[in-house]
Amino acid sequence: MANYKDLIVFRKSDELAFQIYRATEKFPRPEMFGLTSQIRRAALSIPTNIAEGYARKSKKELMQFINIALGSHAETEYLFDFSKRLGYFKTDISQIENLLSEVGKLLWSFHRSL
C-alpha cells in the first residue's frame, strides 16, 4: 500500500472521528472545554496516529502508533458511554456505536498483522 488512506482501518476511524464531532455539536455549552473537547480529541487521535505511524515507514514505529491508537479507541469508547449515561446525545448514535465496534476490531486485526 502506498498511502495510509488506503487502509480500511484509517477510513473507518476517520469516519468515527467525523461522526463524534457531529454528534457532540449539541453537547451542553459548559462541556465545551471538558467532555466535548476530550471525546473529540480522543476520537481524532485514532486516525491521526494511524496516519503518523504509517508515515514512519518502520514496522516497529508503526506498531507503537497503532498501540497509541488502541488506547485512544478505549478512551473514546469510555467517553462515549459516559456521555450516553449523561443523556448528552440528541441524535441517533447507532452509527457511532457500530463504528466504535468495527474500528476496535480493525485496530486489533491490524495490530496482530504487524
Image (cartoon, rainbow, N blue to C red):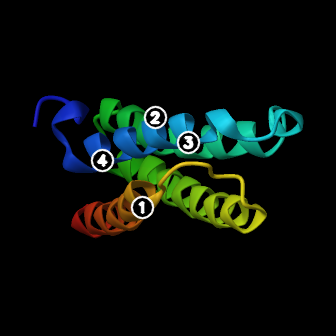
Earlier along the polypeptide chain: callout 2 or callout 1?
Answer: 2
Question: Who is closer to the viewer here, 97 or 5?
Answer: 97
Residue 49 in view (yes/no): no
Which corner quadrant holds the N terminus? Answer: top left
Where disc 4 sits, the SS reads helix
**Numbered disc in front, either 2 or 3:** 3
Residue plotted at (80% across, 32% down): 32
Question: Who is closer to the viewer here, 35 or 104?
Answer: 35
The circle drawn on residue 23 is: 3
Q: How far apart are marks 4 and 3 (CA)?
A: 16 Å
Q: How far apart are marks 1 and 4 (CA)?
A: 15 Å
| Labels 4 & 2 near each other (Cβ < 8 A) | no
**Category of crowding for the residue at label 3, using alpha-carbon neighbours closer than 10 angstroms: few (below 14), some (14–19), many (at least 20):** some
Question: Who is closer to the viewer here, 3 or 19?
Answer: 19
Where disc 1 sits, the SS reads helix
Residue 79 in view (yes/no): yes
Which corner quadrant of the image does residue 41 belong to? top right
Residue at the spot of label 1: 94
Q: In this view, does 76 lie to the left or right of 93?
A: right
Residue at the spot of label 2: 48
**Numbered disc in front, either 4 or 3:** 3
Name which residue type carries label 1. Answer: Ser
Above-or-below relation of 111 to 43: below
Earlier along the polypeptide chain: callout 2 or callout 3?
Answer: 3
Residue at the spot of label 4: 12
